[in-house]
Image: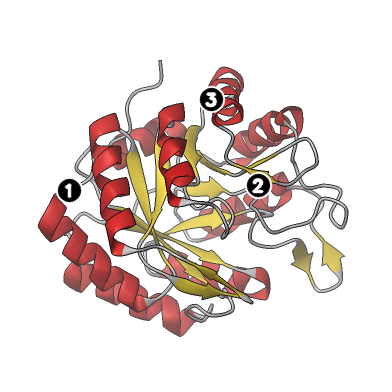
Amino acid sequence: MGATLITVAPTGAEVDKREVPELPVTLEELTATAAACEREGASVIHVHLRDDRARPTLDPGRLREAVAALRESTGLIVQLSTGGAVTDAEEDRLRVLDAAPDMASCTMGTVNFGDEVFTNRWSFITRLHERMQDKAVVPEYELFDLGHLAALERLLDLHGLPYGGHVHVDFVLGVPGGAAGDASTVTAFAEAVRRHLPKETTFSATGIGRTTLPVMLASLAHGGHLRVGMEDTVSFARRQPVTGNDQLVRRAAEAAALAQRPAMPAAEARRLLGVREAA
């Protein structure tokens, strides 16, 4: 079944630094976290940035600086979020690609997001997909509900395969308003991927909050990959806060090893995903 691709999502746009001091929000904190997570087995880093007041930002200069710093300090595949915060404008989200990351997220539909709405219009999705093709950026298609998978099938039929030719999706499960974060939901998503997407499609799965462990274990059981990090949970166990992103990556790597699918090195992940070779 091969090795396990582990993505770390260290920051996100929702967690408050004042409530979770361990959250990496400065560039120095982000690069230190990235290096520690690489040592524990991560091969991809999914990046949201914060400004000087620890608020979510899509500032183009900060994005370019972060991409350069992560490439200099680690061998990780740098994946920028084009989701940002739920209030970010479409044009700002498209400009994320100007920072020339290795990968970027492409969310395949609108979803209720707690009390908010994470809007992803069809016209925006197609523009993002085509701009990634033009800029040689590999997408990770993020699916919050099963209908998003049907949208991805339509996208590929109408607008072609992504840059690199390989389709990789991430199931984001357990968001209030999206699909449930449990083993049966992972099974439904995995079976739908096999029925409707290209044969070589790979998937990872993300469990939000307390759904982290059931989603992780179910994804491994189905031959899938993993995304973990403090964007998705700040609790390691009941009444036990996360001490750092590397703690979550270490647990994921240990689970992958138990499944006889050890953590995948970044160089192998680049070949799998069709990412450009590191400079």
Tell me if 21 is positioned left or right of 233 in this view. right
* Count of picture labels: 3
Residue shown at 34% from the left, 23% from the top = 277
Mark 3: amino acid = Arg
Q: Position of residue 219 (x, y in %)?
A: 45, 67
Q: Which amino acid type corresponds to the residue marked 2 in the rendered image?
A: Pro
User: Mark 2 vs mark 3: which is more N-terminal?
Assistant: 2
On residue 64, the disc is: 3
Asked which quadrant contains residue 224, the reply is: bottom left
Callout in the foreground (2, 3): 3
Could you tell me which residue is drawn at 77 percent across and 69 percent down?
A: 237
Work out whether mark 2 precedes mark 1 in sequence or the reverse, and give the earlier one: 2
Residue 250 image point, x, y percent: 66, 49
Q: How is the image coloured?
A: secondary structure
Q: Quadrant of the N terminus?
A: bottom left
- Camera-near label (3 vs 1) is 3
Label drawn at residue 10:
2
Depth check, front residue: 52 or 149: 52
**SS under mark 3:** helix
- Crowding at mark 1 (Cα within 10 Å: few <14, some 14-19, many 20+): some
Kindly indicate whether the residue at mark 3 contacts the one at mark 2 (C-beta within 8 angstroms). Answer: no
Q: Residues within 10 Å of mark 3 (few under 14, many from 20)?
A: some
Amino acid under disc 1: Leu
Q: Secondary structure at mark 1?
A: loop
